[in-house]
Image (cartoon, rainbow, N blue to C red):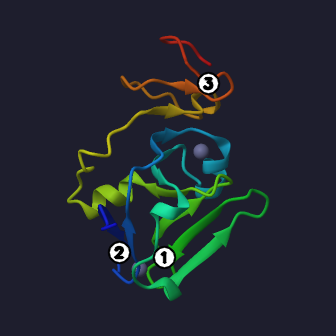
Amino acid sequence: MPAQYRVQCDCASVGLPLTGEPVVRGFCHCEDCRSLLKIPYHSINAWEQDGFSVEAGEALLAEYPHPTLDMKRLFCAKCGETLFNTNKMGWRVVSRSLIRKCYENTLPEALPSQSHFYYGRRMVDVDDDFPKIDSRSGVACPDGAAC
Ligand SMILES: [Zn+2]
Ligand SMILES: [Zn+2]
């Protein structure tokens, strides 16, 4: 299957084709993403492992395994930019900031947001129109409710 999208790091040493439909598109507010990446929430498109390969520079793809979580952050050993992270489901999670950067600062139209995930665990409130999903109940938070 041809690559539908492609991202690369700042120095262009490592390139990743992203094929097939992402399993998740949106924003993750869980503690695990925060702990791995040191960001308030993660804006992501995630692919199953089989929709994902390293096209170039695999030898330069370095990994930081989280000391306690079953997650890794993969980055370019030359320029330091993070290409993706993995989680315990085995997904390959690509930051939408990186995808945007590789597409002239515009997220491709076929990769729209679905919702905010794990919103009940959030560190910051987000005021937008996407559904806010509370991981524990799996249902959308009522308007304005702190779930
Ligand atoms: Zn690089
Ligand atoms: Zn998360």
Are circles 3 and 1 on residues that touch, CB within 8 Å? Answer: no
* Badge number at residue 105: none
Q: Earlier in the sequence, mark 3 or mark 2?
A: 2
3 or 1: nearer the viewer: 1
Residue carrying label 1: 80
Relative side of 79 to 5, left or right: right
Residue carrying label 3: 138
Against 98, is 118 above or below?
above
Q: CA distance from mark 3 to mark 2?
A: 37 Å
Against 136, is 82 above or below?
below
Relative image position of residue 123 (x, y in whole percent)? 59, 35
- Ligand 1 closer than 8 Å to label 2 CB: yes
Are circles 3 and 2 on residues that touch, CB within 8 Å? Answer: no
Residue carrying label 2: 10
Against 121, is 106 above or below?
below
Of helix, strand and loop, which one carries label 1?
A: loop
Q: Residue furthest bottom?
A: 59
Are circles 1 and 2 on residues that touch, CB within 8 Å? Answer: yes
Against 111, is 59 above or below?
below
Q: CA distance from mark 3 to mark 1?
A: 36 Å
Q: Residue furthest front?
A: 1
Q: Quadrant of the N terminus?
A: bottom left
Instruction: Kindly identify the amino acid type of the residue bearing the numbered disc 2.
Output: Asp
Instruction: Kindly identify the amino acid type of the residue bearing the numbered disc 1.
Output: Gly
Rendered residue at 57%/79% (across/down):
62
- Ligand 1 closer than 8 Å to label 1 CB: yes
135 or 100: nearer the viewer: 135
